[in-house]
Amino acid sequence: MKKLLLVCVAVAVLAVAFVAGRLSSPDPVPSARAGNALTPVGPLTTERVEVVVREAPNPAGADGQGAEVVAASEELAGERLTTQEAMIAAITTRSPFVRTLKLHALVQDVPASEMAALMDSFEEHPDKRIRNEARRMLVERWTELSPTGALQWSLAQERKTPTSVPYLTTIFRIWAELDPSGALAAADAVGEDKVRRQAIQAVVNKIASEDYRRARVLMDQYSGEMTDRWRYNSVFRNWAKDDPQGAYQEALTLTDPNQRRSALWSVVNAWAEDDSQAALAAALATPSGSQRQNLIQAALSRMARSDPEAALQIYAGLSPSDVSSWTHAELYRGWAESDPQAAVDHLMANVASPETRRNAIGSIIQTWYRQDPDAALTYLNAMEESPFKGQAMQQLISNLARNEDMDRALDLIETMPLGRNRNQAMQDVARALAETDSQAAMAFVTDNLTGNDRRNAYSNLIYSMLDENPQGAIDLVMSMPPGDNRANMMSNFMWNWSRRDPEGALAWADSLENPYERRQALGRYYDQLGSDDPAALVQMIGTIDDDELRRNAVNSATRSWMSYDPAGALAWISTLPDEGVRKGAVSTAMGSWAQYDPQAAAAWIDQHATADERAQLTNSLANSWCNSDPATAAEWIETLPEGQPYDDAQKTLVNSWLRQDLPAAAAYMAEMPAGANRDDAIRGLVNTIKRYEPAYAAEWALRVQDEGQRKQLLDQSLSEWGKVDKFAARQFILQKDLPDDQRKEYLDKLK
């Protein structure tokens, strides 16, 4: 009893020290984290932390996190540690709870003046997990003490490793908690465009958690810096917690279709936390299509956590076009949060779909394992050997390995039969092992996997080795025999290495002796640089001697530049000396622009494109616009003059729309005038739907004007129909006005 009491005291001391460290920042700005119910205490010293907290076996009768902490009454035999040594010791603590408390207590002792040296001391630490976690904790505390100092250090690191600004988002997120206006001003003053965009996004996202209306205004104010489809998510997620109906209506006003879809999902997901019925009603009011399906899934998944049987009943009554097997599986995952045994029993007794079972069982077991490991494993081991059991075991092992329970993961692998799921589990373990010891991971793969499984595992290991052992990653790539597998691995390797060490990656790619591999590696380098820093790629383009590489580099820079500065990108494109390269870049620019502002791209084509360019640019714009928002693309296409550009754009529209929302596409096709374009559109519809709805396909086939195409499509539709219901197909033929010889031919085929 006395030991348990000491445990509780130790936890309380650490918790207070943790909070006190957050509250006692010398920054003149009051901390947004401050509460008013606690009395601040002095920060713990390194030595005191090592006395107060250390890992220990569970005391008898103790439970919860207190069972992982022992009292402060035992000295550590006079052991003295540097701050770095103490942090390393804390990170290696197995208990996440104790580890977090130790680290937070330790960093309270570090003055701002010593932060840079301590951050640098971890730079070369061989264990990536220790390095990353220590530096993250330090930079959080540094930002609380001196946000400008932390920012200056981060920007200086960017000059050492271009395209990467360490901890920038963390710095501005915490700065925005302490002083939103000051953080925004600092972000706005950052010189480099990409870094500035990242900083502004971090600040506005944090402001959204406290003042979503102000964040909404800032989103529009900085629209040039915040172009991605998810930029409104934090605003509308927090808005929906306060006023879901208002947030939903405001999200509908967004003009960019991708941003609108993303914002609506955030609203419905947050809304469903408090009122899943109202959120579901809003989702059901959305026009048919993939967005409606995603919103329905979000609402039902939340409902399943509190009333799973009601959610399943609603699911059963919905149209197949409104839900998917994944939605079904998500409902069981939500049920498992409250009662995994009931969820899995209901699943196995009531669901016949193999896909739904496969998707659901793994999620249920993982949720169950977090609540009661022994019960989850008992159930899983009692299952008959099957693909469902194998996949569930593989997913559980992968989760355990990622969450630092490697011993249990390896033990479970030994219980699995030989085969695909076991090999996949070993790949997952190797990937997790590589996070801390890439050499051990490589040895594990070499000893346990062969063939394609070994190759896939090596491919995953390469990314983990890039930070600690890039030469080892190179050696692993080059040890593979020449061919497509090595080429694909080299391509992915270059993309990731270029982000970490652009100079080293470029030098290695340029040194390759095989011309094909050299061109491919350099191409990936230029693609990555264009994605992260198009201005730097533009400066380099003049030095590229290979025509194909130079053309691709121009297009890569164009795609990225158009996302935030279309006018600047187009002005640069106009200066390109090679006419072919220039035309290709303009086409790329229109396709990229269509993802952000298709109306502006269409206006530019009308005002600036020559007659020779118009067809190609119109097609490029149509390809992108129809994929993102076919309804508004259709309105634009109908404004085009008759001719080849109009015909090609309409074909692109129908093909894309059929994949996304067949009923809406069919409604558009019904208004098309008879002719070749309409016949081509109907062909696409029939080919899409004939195996699933042959009666519907047959009705449409009869609308084709060209006799040869009409006969062919009707024949295909009836053939599919006859496989499932010959009587209904024959009745259809008898009721339709067809030439006698065709009717007899179809009826004979359906005997």
Image: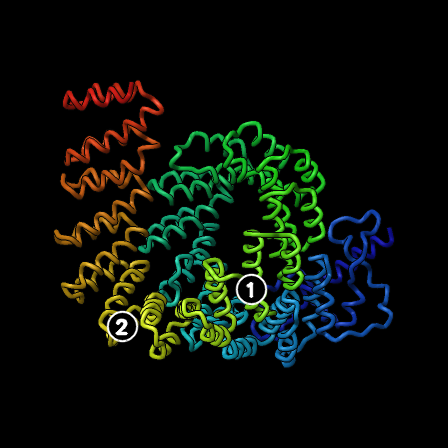
- Expressed as whole percent of the image width and height from the top left, the position of residue 240 reads 45, 50
| Badge 1 amino acid | Ser
Q: Quadrant of residue 341?
A: top right
In the picture shown, does residue 180 fall above or below 314?
below
- Looking at the image, which residue is at 17% across and 62% down? 606
Element on which disc 2 rests: helix
Q: Which residue is mark 2?
A: 573
Q: Residues within 10 Å of mark 1 (few under 14, many from 20)?
A: few
Determine whether, in the image, residue 565 is placed left or right of residue 19.
left
In the picture shown, does residue 162 fall above or below 594?
below
- Residue pushed farthest left? 642
- Looking at the image, which residue is at 51% across and 29% down? 352
Q: Residues within 10 Å of mark 2 (few under 14, many from 20)?
A: many
- Looking at the image, which residue is at 62% across and 61% down? 435
- Expressed as whole percent of the image width and height from the top left, the position of residue 311 reads 50, 34
| Nearer to me, 226 or 478 | 478
- Expressed as whole percent of the image width and height from the top left, the position of residue 275 reads 48, 41
Determine whether, in the image, residue 435 is placed left or right of residue 738.
right
- Residue pushed farthest bottom? 113
- Looking at the image, which residue is at 52% across and 70% down? 500
Element on which disc 1 rests: loop
Q: Which residue is mark 1?
A: 479
